[in-house]
Image (spheres, rainbow, N blue to C red):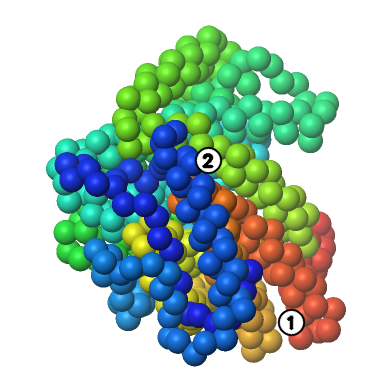
Amino acid sequence: MKHNSADYIELSIHNNEDNDDPPDRVGHDEDILEKDQEYQATAALLTDVESNHSTDEFVIYESNENKPEPKHENTLAIQALPSLIISVIGLVLAGNLMDDFQHWDVFLKTTELFILLPILLNLKGNLEMNLAARFSTSSNLGELDYGPTRRSLIVGNLALLQVQSLVAGAIAGVSSFALGLITKPGSSTSYYEMMYMTASSMVSASFSSAILGIFMCALIIICRKFDVDPDNIACPMASSTGDIVTLVLLATSASILQNQMESIFSTLIFLIMLGLIPIFGLIVWRNSHVKDLLFAGWTPIILAMVISSLAGILLEAYVEQYKGVALLTPVLIGLAGNLGSIYASRISTCLHSETKENYKVVEYTLMAMNIPVQVVFMVIIWAFGMGQLQYNVWFFLSYFMISMVCTWICLKIGKIMSLTFWRMGYDPDNYVIPYLTASIDVIGTILLVSVFTLLTSTGAADMSMTERAANKHN
């Protein structure tokens, strides 16, 4: 849906008259009818905007009484740029760690761990970015300013993250084992290996969620204290730190459990991890702020994993055909996804708090921020000679063009999805980011491979690894 006539859109939700506790973000059963009517009214009003040819700077649908102050776009670049640069450095470090892990004994003996890595990182990344977006909204709504509510939100969200991470870890472990059977039908596998994969996945997922969950909650509370908008920094920080922490913990837990692979030790660890799910689930169920999230939001997380698997198949098909694909793809799609998640998180906060977002200014600012961050990345890989790339003008221009296109697509997807899910009655904080990151995984990989093919076929830049492979065989 296009909104050609307005840069600002304000949506209204019901007011909570309970002065003792800030309003919950997720509606309860008794509010469903009322909220459905409001969402229908919102959709009708948004439709009216399409035919509105007024020259007003913004559109306000309801009274502005008791509205929070609008967020200032001029602080976006100042606050978000450092976190984006850190996220790129984190992506590069994560890539180097994955390269190092290829030579570890645990990965050489159990090659299915390489299948587990992208699945687990995708699932865990979405969970932590959802937490960052959700907690940022709570911060901007002022819910963290009230002591009992702040403690309840922290405990509830951390317990919810444990439930989600343990389930995600089990899914990732079983899925990677099953994919290993499919891709290597003649290999010898056993029940113990499946338990080993699943236990390693669940342990690393649980511990990394505990570390990152506490870190994200503390970061957002500090942002609130110093009047920094967490929407601008939380998602990139969750993305950059999440991959590194999860990688290290997975390698550590897999190394420890490998010595006991042929025993029931992994099975006992799996049963202990499985038994923690109902315990943390009970904590979530008794928490009024996150109770409704216990069974919500699973569909986008699972579907995002399936969509990202398509990107993984493409990456595997071309990673040995073109130079730099393994190095450039994570940063290309990771940075675009971080910029899109910032935008989606800001829009979601505006929808919840009934404030206005200057879409054009925010989009242009985020697009512009992509340039210096990509420059930092290119300088790093050029200075250290990473990827064995042919650094010429055509390569730099092509890569920057792709990065700008990916960022623009990601911003548009984030905006459309946030408004669409809100009109459908779903909280964008729990639904948008998984679909957003999965979509850009596929789009970014296709664009990068297509441009590398074009550069090689025209002779503008030799991105092919054919010559290198031939020399290796000789």
Q: In this view, does 472 lie to the left or right of 175?
A: right
Mark number, residue 461: 1
Residue at mark 1 to residue at mark 2: CA–CA distance: 44 Å
- Residue at 52 percent across and 58 percent down: it is 41
* Quarter of the figure with residue 391: bottom right
Tell me the amino acid under the disc marked 2. Answer: Gly
* Quarter of the figure with residue 219: bottom left
Q: Where is residue 471 in the image (x, y as percent from the top left)?
A: 78, 64
Above or below, 257 relative to 385: above
Label 2 neighbourhood size at 10 Å, few (<14), some (14-19), many (20+)?
Answer: many
Q: Which of 210 and 149 is in front in this view?
A: 149
Q: How many numbered marks have been drawn onto this rendered protein structure?
A: 2
Above or below, 131 relative to 196: below
* Quarter of the figure with residue 136: bottom left
The N terminus sits in image quarter: bottom right
Q: Position of residue 105 (x, y in %)?
A: 56, 35
Above or below, 353 relative to 278: below
- Residue at 56 percent across and 37 percent down: it is 298
Judged from the image, the secondary structure of the residue bearing numbered disc 2 is loop
- Residue at 48 percent across and 18 percent down: it is 274
Above or below, 145 relative to 231: above
Mark number, residue 200: none
Question: Is residue 180 visible to us here?
Answer: yes
The C terminus sits in image quarter: bottom right
Residue lying farthest to the top in this orientation: 264
Residue on which the image places disc 2: 297
- Residue at 32 percent across and 81 percent down: it is 74
Label 1 neighbourhood size at 10 Å, few (<14), some (14-19), many (20+)?
Answer: some
Tell me the amino acid under the disc marked 1. Answer: Ala
Q: Where is residue 288 in the image (x, y as percent from the top left)?
A: 32, 33
Mark 1 or mark 2, earlier in chain: 2
Q: Where is residue 151 in the image (x, y as percent from the top left)?
A: 21, 38
